[in-house]
Amino acid sequence: MTAMTAIDPRPLVGEPVSLDLLNTRWNEEGVRQDLLSGVEGLAVWLAANGLDERFAADATTLRHTLTARDALRALVDRPGDSAATARVDAVLGHGRIRATLTAEGPGERPEFADPAWGPAWTAARDYLDLLRTAPDRIRACAHEACILHFFDTSRNGTRRWCSMAVCGNRAKASRHYARTKEG
C-alpha cells in the first residue's frame, strides 16, 4: 500500500499514534488545517505512523479514522466523561488483541473483523496504553491559539508547549511585548 507519499505538512509529528491522530488538525496563521480532509492526507498519516503497509488509505478507513479522532478529542477534552468514554469504547469494539506464541516467545497480534477499522482501533488502543503509563503526561499545548497535543517525556514532567521553538517562543514574545507596552 506504500506509494509515493506526500510530505507531512503538520507542525508536530512523532507523538504516540493516538495523539498524532489528534494532531491531524492544527492552526496555521489563524486558519484551521486538517490533514484528514481526504484519502491523500490519510495516506500521509498512515505512512507517518508505520500503518501504511497494513491498512488501505480509502474512504471507509478515512471515515472510521475520523470517528476515532472525534472520539479521542472528546475524551481528551473531557477526561472521565461517560459519553466520550463510550465513543472510544465503541471504536475499541471493532478490534481485539489475540495472544500468540512466536519463535521469540509470547506475543500479541491485533485482529479486526473489518480491516478498515484498524487505524482507528490502533489509535484508541494506544490512548489506553498512555492512560495506563502516565495519564498526567498527556497534555494540550499551553498556547491559547494552539490545538496540538503531546505526551510529555521531559524528565520533570513540566513541558507546556507542543514546541518551545514555536508556541513557547510566541508566548515569551507576547509576555515581552506586554511588559514593554506597560513600561
Image: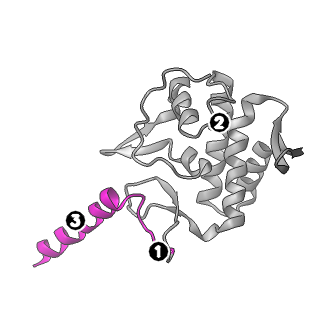
* Residue 93 visible somewhere in the drawing: no
Tag 3: amino acid: Ala
Tag 2: amino acid: Thr
Q: Earlier in the sequence, mark 2 or mark 1?
A: 2
Looking at the image, which residue is at 13% across and 76% down? 182
Say whether marks 2 and 3 touch (CB < 8 Å): no
Residue on which the image places disc 3: 173
Q: Secondary structure at mark 1?
A: loop
**Marks 2/3: CA–CA distance:** 37 Å
Q: Is residue 76 above or below residue 64?
A: below
Looking at the image, which residue is at 41% across and 63% down? 161
Q: Nearer the viewer, residue 108 or 36?
A: 108
Residue 176: x percent and y percent? 19, 71
| Magenta segment boundaries in residue numbering | 157-183
Q: Nearer the viewer, residue 131 or 76?
A: 131
Residue on which the image places disc 2: 65
Say whether marks 2 and 1 touch (CB < 8 Å): no
Q: Quadrant of residue 57?
A: top right
Residue 150: x percent and y percent? 51, 58
Q: Nearer the viewer, residue 118 or 179?
A: 118
